[in-house]
Image: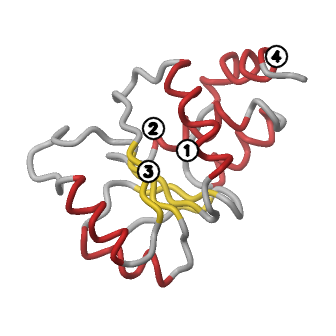
């Protein structure tokens, strides 16, 4: 299991296995977020099985699948309030962790400095510099 801490509230990971869930709970995560569509790849564990294990181990479960390479503003609109309300720290996963990092960065840009977010993502191993324009748009569209 390759958990990459972005900050105190969010970590991301590539596809997890059902056997990883007890360790995820032991590490103190409160919410498990799945950003990968069920059945995206042969051999991927069914989301219903991951959900059952997550709930059995006291984790809140959120299933918000997004298409790889096609994260829309609607996806960000769905992720932002869910993440804001989620019990922290949260662990989000997809195939490589990138989709989860992108959703976090775009939604967080509404309230945080995009450059700081890029730095945090980079420290976790995700180069999201190609999103800077979208992050600034999120920031501008959601200023109070």
Quarter placement of the C terminus: top right
Rendered image quadrant of residue 80:
top right
Q: Quadrant of residue 7?
A: bottom right
Q: Residue under circle 4? A: 140
Task: Mark 4 and mark 2 in contact? Answer it, CB < 8 Å.
Answer: no
Please determine whether, in this image, residue 128 is positioned above or below residue 95.
above
Q: Residue furthest bottom?
A: 26
Q: Which numbered mark, 4 or 2, is in the foreground of this view?
A: 4
Q: Looking at the image, which residue is at 80% across and 42% down?
A: 116
Please name the residue that numbered disc 3 is placed on: 62
- Looking at the image, tell me whether mark 4 or mark 3 is earlier in sequence order: 3
Q: Position of residue 11 (x, y in %)?
A: 56, 59
Of residues 88 and 40, the one drawn nearer to the viewer in this rendering: 88
Circle 1 is placed at which residue position? 126
Describe the element under mark 1 as helix, strand or loop.
loop
Tell me how far mark 1 sits from mark 4, CA to CA.
23 Å
Task: Give me the C-alpha separation between circle 4 and circle 3.
Answer: 27 Å
Looking at the image, is mark 3 or mark 1 earlier in the sequence? 3
Describe the colour scheme in one phrase. secondary structure
Kind of element beneath mark 3 = strand
Counting other residues with Cα less than 10 Å from the Cα at mark 1, is it few (<14), some (14-19), or many (20 or more)?
some
Query: Crowding near pointer 3: few (<14 within 10 Å), some, many (20+)?
Result: some
């Amino acid at each position: 299991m390759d958990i990459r801490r972005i900050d105190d509230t969010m970590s991301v990971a590539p596809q997890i296995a059902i056997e990883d869930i007890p360790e995820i709970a032991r590490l103190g995560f409160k919410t498990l977020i799945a950003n990968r569509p069920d059945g995206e790849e042969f051999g991927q564990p069914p989301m219903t099985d991951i959900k059952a294990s997550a709930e059995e181990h006291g984790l809140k479960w959120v299933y918000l699948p997004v298409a790889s390479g096609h994260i829309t503003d609607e996806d960000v609109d769905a992720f932002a309030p869910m993440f804001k309300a989620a019990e922290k720290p949260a662990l989000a996963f997809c195939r490589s962790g990138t989709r989860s990092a992108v959703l976090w960065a775009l939604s967080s840009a509404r309230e945080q400095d995009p450059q700081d977010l890029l730095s945090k993502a980079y420290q976790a191993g995700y180069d999201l510099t190609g999103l800077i324009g979208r992050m600034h748009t999120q920031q501008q569209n959601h200023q109070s």
